């Protein structure tokens, strides 16, 4: 146990989160079992350590552990928790919980140690409540995303802009943009964000694209194969499928052709597409009223950084802008296939068209136009970058 305490103290003391994530204030920390899901690379481990540093410092009543530790190949989580509670432990932070196969032990800890709070991180691929009924009713699940454009801009420019709701942006975008433009020119930072601003590891002194490619491989090799218990021999098929989808761009998938290309069945292709979506590598866009397992009307990469890393020679600006809009609204809104002349329908009937610079269109008062390279909008013409302030 002393080794775990020493490791915890070292990690907390050396944690320096560049951006305080808003999720820190959105979580109800009074709950006793909290799951924080997120795609690989968005900073879940740092988030746990930041919480420990803010609330407890190096106080031994809080302890960070990683399920990668070989200790847990011999001893159970219940045994560990019992010893921790016996020593006065109150908050157990568990990183990479999917590496530990016995989910029932989390419920056992919850029931056996009523004074213990457990906060754990897991992959976005995990279906905590659906696939682990023993956790249903007791776990509260939250989602940590990559940096928004707002968070990236605050970090790079030294500002502290707040987030806005979609309604606020639609109704008051001119005044909001003026407030921001008095302090910084967002368009000076926007292209860099599209290229490398979503994943916090752009701050590391390593090649970002190489690092992201490594992370994408880990998403498939560990998050998908391990959690979905897929045999290793199918790994190359899933990787090839992701590449083909990225190369095709945001279009409706030709499932029969993809099945031929990766030498598997149509049903398996659709399952793999679902796993890639769960891993937050792609997004599926459907007409309103339709959903998986139907074929989506469009497949898009989950965020723009992925586009530049997986197939940089064929990155179309319009596709990048559409992907940015989809990704930034994805957190709190439902996006559907747009009607003719629009890009997306949002929620229950908000129509948007995403416009690259120089795009020509006839203004429809029932449509909101998100315009690239526009600093300040007017009426239903809104700067695209401002949608990056939704979280």
Image (cartoon, helix red, strand yellow):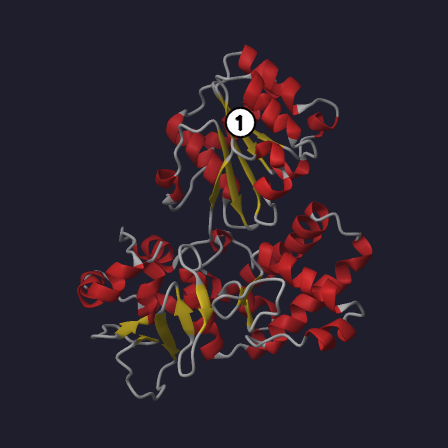
Q: Which residue is drawn at the image coordinates 65% and 63% (left, top)? A: 273
Q: Taking 169 as reference, is 59 left or right?
A: right
Numbered label tally: 1
Q: Nearer the viewer, residue 30 or 186?
A: 30
Q: Which residue is mark 1?
A: 8
Question: Residue extending furthest top?
Answer: 86
**Image location (x, y in percent) of residue 285:** 52, 68
Residue at figure coordinates x 48%, y 62% from the top left: 196
Residue 324 falls in which quadrant of the image? Answer: bottom left
Picture layout, residue 35 above or below residue 233: above
Of residues 298 and 120, the one nearer the viewer is 298
Q: Is residue 238 above or below residue 230?
A: below
Q: Residue at 36% across / 86% down in the picture?
A: 359
* Residue 3 located left or right of residue 261: left
Q: Picture coordinates of residue 27 (x, y %)?
A: 40, 37
| Relative image position of residue 84 (x, y in whole percent) | 56, 16
The image shows residue 148 at horizontal and vertical percentages of: 40, 57
Residue drawn at x 29%, y 77% as measured from the top left = 366
Viewport quadrant of the C terminus: bottom left
């Amino acid at each position: 146990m002393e080794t775990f305490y020493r490791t915890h103290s070292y990690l907390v003391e050396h944690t320096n989160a560049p951006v305080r994530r808003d999720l820190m204030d959105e979580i109800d920390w009074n709950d006793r079992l909290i799951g924080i899901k997120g795609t690989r690379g968005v900073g879940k481990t740092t988030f746990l350590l930041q919480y420990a540093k803010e609330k407890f410092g190096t106080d031994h009543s809080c302890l960070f552990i990683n399920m990668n530790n070989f200790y847990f190949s011999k001893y159970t989580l219940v045994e560990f928790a019992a010893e921790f509670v016996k020593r006065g432990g109150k908050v157990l932070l568990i990183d990479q919980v999917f590496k530990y196969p016995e989910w029932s032990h989390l419920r056992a800890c919850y029931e056996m140690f009523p004074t213990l709070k457990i906060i754990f991180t897991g992959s976005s691929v995990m279906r905590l409540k659906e696939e682990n009924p023993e956790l249903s009713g007791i776990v509260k699940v939250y989602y940590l995303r990559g940096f928004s454009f707002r968070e990236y801009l605050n970090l790079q420019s030294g500002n502290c802009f707040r987030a806005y709701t979609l309604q606020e942006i639609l109704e008051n975008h001119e005044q909001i943009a003026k407030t921001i433009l008095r302090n910084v020119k967002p368009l000076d930072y926007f292209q860099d964000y599209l290229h490398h601003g979503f994943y916090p590891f752009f701050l590391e002194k390593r090649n970002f694209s190489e690092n992201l490619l490594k992370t994408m491989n880990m998403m498939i090799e560990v998050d998908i194969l391990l959690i979905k218990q897929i045999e290793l021999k199918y790994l190359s098929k899933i990787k090839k499928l992701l590449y083909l989808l990225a190369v095709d761009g945001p279009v409706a998938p030709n499932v029969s052709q993809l099945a031929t290309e990766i030498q598997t069945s149509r049903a398996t292709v659709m399952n793999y597409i679902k796993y890639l979506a769960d891993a937050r590598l792609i997004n599926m866009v459907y007409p309103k009223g339709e959903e998986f397992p139907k074929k989506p009307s469009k497949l898009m990469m989950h965020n723009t950084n992925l586009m530049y890393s997986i197939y940089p020679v064929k990155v179309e600006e319009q596709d990048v802008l559409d992907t940015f809009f989809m990704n930034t609204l994805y957190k709190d809104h439902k996006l559907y296939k747009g009607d003719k002349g629009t890009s997306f329908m949002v929620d229950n009937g908000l129509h948007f068209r995403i416009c690259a610079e120089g795009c020509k269109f006839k203004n429809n008062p029932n449509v909101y136009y998100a315009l690239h390279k526009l600093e300040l909008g007017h009426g239903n013409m809104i700067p695209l970058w401002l949608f990056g302030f939704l979280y």
